[in-house]
Amino acid sequence: MSFTQLSQSYPIARKEHICIWCGEKIEKGEKYYCYSGIGDDGFQTNKVHLECRIAMDKHFSFDTFDDEFMPYEFKRGSTEQR
């Protein structure tokens, strides 16, 4: 699977979202990481807790050298699978 990132930002949630990494809620008023791009399935925008963003960096850089994961696959803020 390929993914080309087009944008990223660190907004404050105006409403509740679901983190693509852990599947837990991003609460209204919480700062989070948002990235958009084009993958095999078309355009997508994903939202991630800040601590999950750090875990993503560890997963991609050190653990597997992989650039993909299944939504909600990991525990919050961790590279440990559910």
Image (cartoon, rainbow, N blue to C red):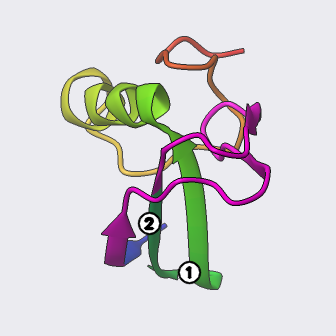
Mark 1, other Cα within 10 Å: few <14 / some 14–19 / many ≥20 = few
Picture residue at 28% right of the left edge, 35% below the top: 57
Mark 2, other Cα within 10 Å: few <14 / some 14–19 / many ≥20 = some
Q: Is label 2 in a helix, a strand or a loop?
A: strand
Q: Give left or right: position of 10 versus 25.
A: left
Instruction: Give the image location of residue 51, x and y in percent.
Output: 44, 25
Give, as a single range, the part of the protein colored magenta. 6-33
| Front of the two marks 2 and 1 | 2
Q: Is label 1 in a helix, a strand or a loop?
A: loop
Above or below, 29 relative to 43: above
Picture residue at 58% right of the left edge, 40% below the top: 30
Above or below, 44 relative to 25: below
Q: Give left or right: position of 59 versus 37.
A: left
Tell me, for residue 2, which label it has, or none.
none
Picture residue at 62% right of the left edge, 16% below the top: 81
Instruction: Give the image location of residue 49, x and y in percent.
Output: 53, 36
Q: Which residue is identified by label 2?
A: 35
- Residue 58: image quadrant is top left
What amino acid is labelled 1 in the image? Asp
Task: Report the residue that reaches farthest toward the left.
Answer: 61
What amino acid is labelled 2 in the image? Tyr
Picture residue at 36% right of the left edge, 51% below the top: 67
- Residue 14: image quadrant is bottom right
Tell me, for residue 40, which label it has, or none.
1
Above or below, 80 relative to 59: above
- Magenta stretch: includes residue 13: yes
Residue closest to the eye, 62 or 45: 45
Instruction: Give the image location of residue 5, x and y in percent.
Output: 34, 75
Q: Give left or right: position of 63 versus 3.
A: left
- Measure the C-alpha gap from mark 2 to mark 1: 16 Å
- Magenta stretch: includes residue 23: yes
